[in-house]
Image (spheres, rainbow, N blue to C red):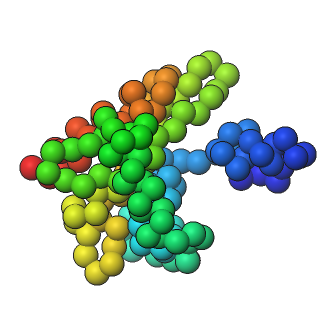
């Protein structure tokens, strides 16, 4: 997240706009941190990126907000049969349109020893709104893994 150039850019960055850049792996980590209260550096190879820090905010409040987003908010299309899904939709404006996002956690899938369970991010480049495009894909992913 680059240093904001002015107050307008600071406000834009506060809601994930402006020059903010994030990878899907990073955003999955953000979703997990909202549940566990700990942010773990994303990694591709097991054993790498093991650093961990305390995440800002109350995990109980953040988890509750993410649960509400899927139960009756913009992320209802991410609901999966028989599996709890907590998440957040997003839409990134880019020069050639919009990218659809959904970041989430399925706490009971693979969660052990205080882990968040399965944390994931769905990004559809050129996909429009996150709740319409990325959230249904998240439901498909969680449903398939639950089987």
| Residue that lies at the very extreme toward the top in this rendered image | 96
Residue 31 picture quarter: bottom left
Residue 33 visible at all:
no
| Image coordinates for residue 138, horizontal then vertical, percent | 31, 41
| Residue that lies at the very extreme toward the bottom in this rendered image | 113
Name the side, left or right, on which 135 lies relative to 15.
left
| Image coordinates for residue 77, horizontal then vertical, percent | 31, 35
| Residue that lies at the very extreme toward the left in this rendered image | 147
Residue 66 picture quarter: bottom left
Name the side, left or right, on which 90 lies relative to 102.
right
Q: Give the residue displayed 58% in from the left and 33% down from the top.
A: 92
Against 147, is 94 above or below? Answer: above
Q: Give the residue displayed 24% in from the left and 55% down from the top.
A: 84
Please tell me which residue lies in front, 67 or 83.
67
Q: Give the residue displayed 48% in from the left and 62% down from the top.
A: 62
| Image coordinates for residue 109, horizontal then vertical, percent | 21, 61
| Residue that lies at the very extreme toward the front in this rendered image | 72
Q: Give the residue displayed 21% in from the left and 44% down from the top.
A: 80
Against 95, is 2 above or below? Answer: below
Residue 3 visible at all:
yes
């Amino acid at each position: 997240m680059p240093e904001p150039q002015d107050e307008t850019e600071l406000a834009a960055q506060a809601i994930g706009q402006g020059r903010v850049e994030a990878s899907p792996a990073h955003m999955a980590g953000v979703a997990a941190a909202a549940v566990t209260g700990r942010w773990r550096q994303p990694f591709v190879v097991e054993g790498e990126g093991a650093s961990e820090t305390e995440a800002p905010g109350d995990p109980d409040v953040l988890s509750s907000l993410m649960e509400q987003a899927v139960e009756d908010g913009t992320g209802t299309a991410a609901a999966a049969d028989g599996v709890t899904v907590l998440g957040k939709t997003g839409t990134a404006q880019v020069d050639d349109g919009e990218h659809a996002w959904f970041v989430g956690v399925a706490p009971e899938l693979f969660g052990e020893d205080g882990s968040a369970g399965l944390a994931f991010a769905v990004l559809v480049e050129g996909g429009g709104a996150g709740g319409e495009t990325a959230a249904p894909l998240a439901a498909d992913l969680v449903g398939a893994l639950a089987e």
